[in-house]
DNA sequence: TTTT
DNA sequence: TTTT
């Protein structure tokens, strides 16, 4: 999904500290009416929930209202009860890091930390290297926290 | 693939009149070097060949140098001979309408004809309704230019 | 989305004859519980609506209960009223031919008509050439049903 | 890309121990010739390079010749010199964990370790949870090897 | 060199 | 040769 963020993201935390980001994403279609020739537009709103910790950081730091995002995740339908006890269902796009991606498509959101773009979703800074951060494990080496990805300019000797 | 068009597209035609568009697409990654902290960038260039007639029209009318595109197609490797007769291979992204998509991601390229966005690739005019034009079959119907897709606001009675 | 079809598809027609296919698709995840070590599974069910005429034909002819499909479409949420007049919302994946794809991932569903696979969704017959049928343009050619796509072995002279 | 693995994967290691997996993936199209009515087939072969450590483990443990895979990665063209010193170019699909996914589409490859499927690429065990292992961050929790993803049945209290 |  |  490619769309625009409708409001600044909400970030909450679970009791044991894991972050969860909620996003509202708008996708719009425009077309010209066959009969009247008028320009028409329709906007669809989507709920996106980010459980992936790396992606949550990205969202927290860079994603603001109006940002254009590429989103890829799983479709999940949650069951809940309304006030009168009736079953209700809400469908969300869930980013849990499995087949999940979030890439910023506009140039906003430049920032501090070490990060790295990638994939074929370029032409704008990408903040989706979450997958590349190894379990690190503390340990003071300067590359210990390094990415398991090849440096762009690394020589990889076998 | 999401990237930027490096030059105005070339449109050629086969002897029997079918259009073929060639695009150069750049995808860029930026990251901050782990050691030096410097900002780094790498750009990858891709050859994209569009055989799909509807998509060729879109390319011809709206895609210019600098446009940002979402591209989805098949990966194909062509064999050819260089001047010395050696085998060479070139890999291209081929849009033949099967699992193929091209969507404009910036607002440029507004224009005349009837067209219609769609999918979840919104937030900018989409010109990818090629798939929706039925084989028409002549017959001078008032829907000759019609899409087989439902109008966004159509009432669809069963 | 890659999943399995839960029941034979329902095909309806609009009053003016356009087909609409409804599919139930299951996507399943399996994992081993971190604590108990037991194998767990969760299945998610999705509603898929196909408006694209070509894809509807594919669905009608080849898609049966149990088929494994690759599906790509737009996410849309419909509002409706339940019996007590309360607003309800249902989210569906809509295939209208824009950025929409349906590919069979198992070998079932072999059949009569001329068709053509494609894309990088291979290794099984593909029935997604709907996008490739040009507006034909009369001419009574023997290629009336022809694809605008290049023949695999065509010589394309410029 | 959805395709079949042509040979058992090769796994190499860099001098500093990072794994790199190389895969050959075949995607096939079948169609019926418009004129002769004969069944035709064309196979395309792709080079896939996996730098992502989690995905390398998946490849090492589960991916064998014949496996059907869903692959998503970046397209990269490498320059190299042949024996006569001429420049040559090879295009590969690179999985570095950014917008990269690898999912097994057939039921093979069941195994030992804790793992977890996900995304909408279900209906078969998925082994793509690499992205979900957090930097752990010490803390001596019993969930040290835990996923940052929500358990399917976890209660997530805020 | 895969698969259906 | 693009873009940010």
Image: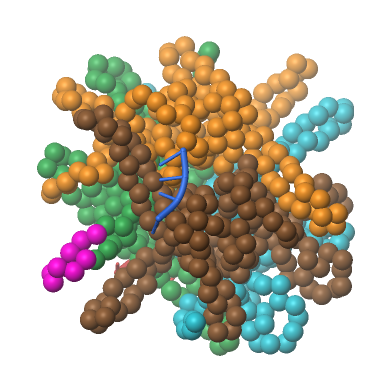
Chain colours: A cyan, B green, C orange, D brown, E blue, F red
Question: x%, y% of residue D10?
Answer: 50, 68
Count of residue discs:
0
Whether residue B84 appears in magenta in the rendering, the answer is yes
Residue D86 as seen in the image, left or right of residue C33: left
Residue B152 seen in this snapshot: no
Residue D84 as seen in the image, left or right of residue D43: left
Whether residue A148 appears in magenta in the rendering, the answer is no
Question: x%, y% of residue B58?
Answer: 31, 44
Write the start and end of the magenta stretch as one range. Answer: B79-87
Point 76% across, 80% down: residue: A138
Residue A84 as seen in the image, left or right of residue D94: right
Residue A91 to residue A95: above or below: above
Residue D33 seen in this snapshot: yes
Residue C148 to residue B153: above or below: below
Point 32% across, 46% down: residue: D42
Point 82% across, 46% down: residue: D153
Between C60 and A127, the residue placed more toward the observer is C60
| Residue B113: quadrant of the picture | top left
Point 52% across, 19% down: residue: C11
Question: x%, y% of residue D101?
Answer: 56, 57
Residue A146 to residue C34: above or below: below
Question: x%, y% of residue A125?
Answer: 52, 67
């Amino acid at each position: 999904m490619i769309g625009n963020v409708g409001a600044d993201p909400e970030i909450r935390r679970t009791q044991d500290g894991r972050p969860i980001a909620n996003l509202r994403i708008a996708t719009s279609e425009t077309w010209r009416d066959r009969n009247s020739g008028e320009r028409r537009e329709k906007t669809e709103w989507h709920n996106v929930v980010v459980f992936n910790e790396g992606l949550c950081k990205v969202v927290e730091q860079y994603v603001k209202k109006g940002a254009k995002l590429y989103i890829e995740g799983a479709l999940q339908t949650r069951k809940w009860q309304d006030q009168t006890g009736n079953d209700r269902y809400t469908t969300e796009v869930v980013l849990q890091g499995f087949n999940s991606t979030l890439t910023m498509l506009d140039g906003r959101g430049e920032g501090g930390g070490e990060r790295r773009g990638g994939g074929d979703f370029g032409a704008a800074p990408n903040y989706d290297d979450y997958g590349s951060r190894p379990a690190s494990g503390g340990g003071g080496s300067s590359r210990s926290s390094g990415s398991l990805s090849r440096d762009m300019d690394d020589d990889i000797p076998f």
